[in-house]
Amino acid sequence: QVQLAESGGGLVQPGGSLRLSCAASGGIVSIYAMGWYRQTPGKQRELVASISSGGSTNFADSVKGRFTISRANAKNTVYLQMISLKPEDTAVYYCNVDATVNLIGRMNFWGQGTQVTVSS
């Protein structure tokens, strides 16, 4: 079974930084796009950032210039570096991976979510 292990969330003061990591494992043949989404209570999950297999990136307007996404293909891992964090960045952050898996084929997978809280 594919597992996405997320880490790096927590409580940080406004202006602070955090780095999220998400490592995929379990029968993975190929990984295409990887990304991070976030969700707050009562709102739809929204894309924060994504990165293609070729390294092309895409960011939500609200995080451009503050967040960076990268990936380590040899480790099947995607990172989200967040700086200059604002209270409105508070949310549960979810890792998303588009991958081909043994005996299953190509599917989209979600992590369990990690809480990021920006507060003084």
Image (cartoon, helix red, strand yellow):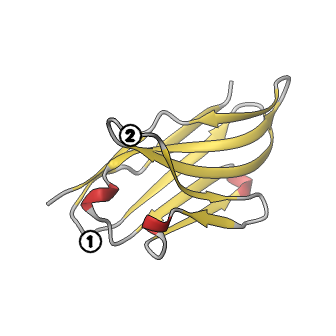
Report the Cα–Cα distance between label 2 and label 1: 24 Å
Q: Dot 2 surroundings within 10 Å: few (below 14), some, or many (20 or more)?
A: few
Q: Quadrant of the C terminus?
A: bottom left
Closer to the camera in the image, 64 or 26: 64
> Quadrant location of residue 98?
top right
Which amino acid, by three-letter code, is at mark 1? Gly
In percent of the image, x 48 and y 33: which residue is there? 112
> Quadrant location of residue 63?
bottom left
Q: Secondary structure at mark 1?
A: loop
Asked if residue 116 is positioned above or below residue 42 in the image, the reply reads: below
Q: Position of residue 56 (x, y in %)?
A: 71, 67
**Residue 66 tag number:** none
Query: Is 53 on the left-hand or right-hand side of 40?
Result: right
The residue tagged 2 is 43
The residue tagged 1 is 15
Give the mark nearer the N terminus: 2 vs 1.
1
Asked if residue 36 is positioned above or below residue 29 in the image, the reply reads: below
Closer to the camera in the image, 68 or 61: 61
Q: Secondary structure at mark 2?
A: loop
